[in-house]
Image (tube, rainbow, N blue to C red):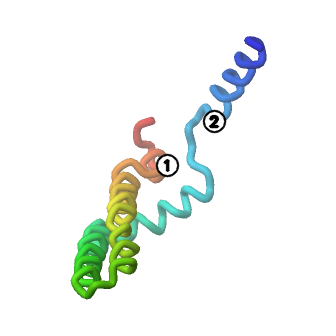
Amino acid sequence: MEQSVNDLKNKADNFNPQQKEGPVAKAIEEYTAKLPSDLFLWAALGSMAVSATLKIMKKDEEALFVGQWPAPFLLLGLYNKIVKVEGHDKTDKGGRR
């Protein structure tokens, strides 16, 4: 059992030693880096406003549905910012890592 755990650990340690991004991640980064970070903030704030409006209109189920959107928008905004600061193109251009 211990040998198989060590084998698995060694395989995991040597899986991607250069820590390079795959083609899918690179493609996503290229598109998301073009979007302004404000877009995600405004989308989150807008969905909060829509949710509050729906709640006032007594459309509770719709308000709850739309009210769940701000967190994913803000997470996408964080991803966007990280891609811009630490994205794959930093390593492709001779940056650190």
Question: Quadrant of the image for the C terminus?
Answer: top left
Above or below — where is 74 with respect to 63? above
Task: Give 69 or 92, whichever is nearer the viewer.
Answer: 69
Residue at 57% x, 43% y: name it. Answer: 20
Label 1 close to label 2 by CB (< 8 Å): no
Residue at 28% x, 84% y: name it. Answer: 58
List the residue tagged with mark 1. Answer: 92
Horizontal and vertical percent position of residue 77: 34, 62
Label 1 residue SS: helix
Horizontal and vertical percent position of residue 29: 48, 60
Which callout, 1 or 2, points at the residue further toward the start of the chain? 2
Above or below — where is 50 with respect to 44? below
Question: What's the mark number on residue 34?
Answer: none
Kindly identify the amino acid type of the residue bearing the numbered disc 2. Asn
Question: What's the mark number on residue 16?
Answer: 2
Above or below — where is 31 with respect to 17? below
Cα–Cα span, label 1 and label 2: 16 Å
Horizontal and vertical percent position of residue 93: 45, 49
Label 2 residue SS: loop
Q: Is residue 22 left or right of residue 66?
A: right
Q: Residue 27 lies in what quarter of the image? A: bottom right
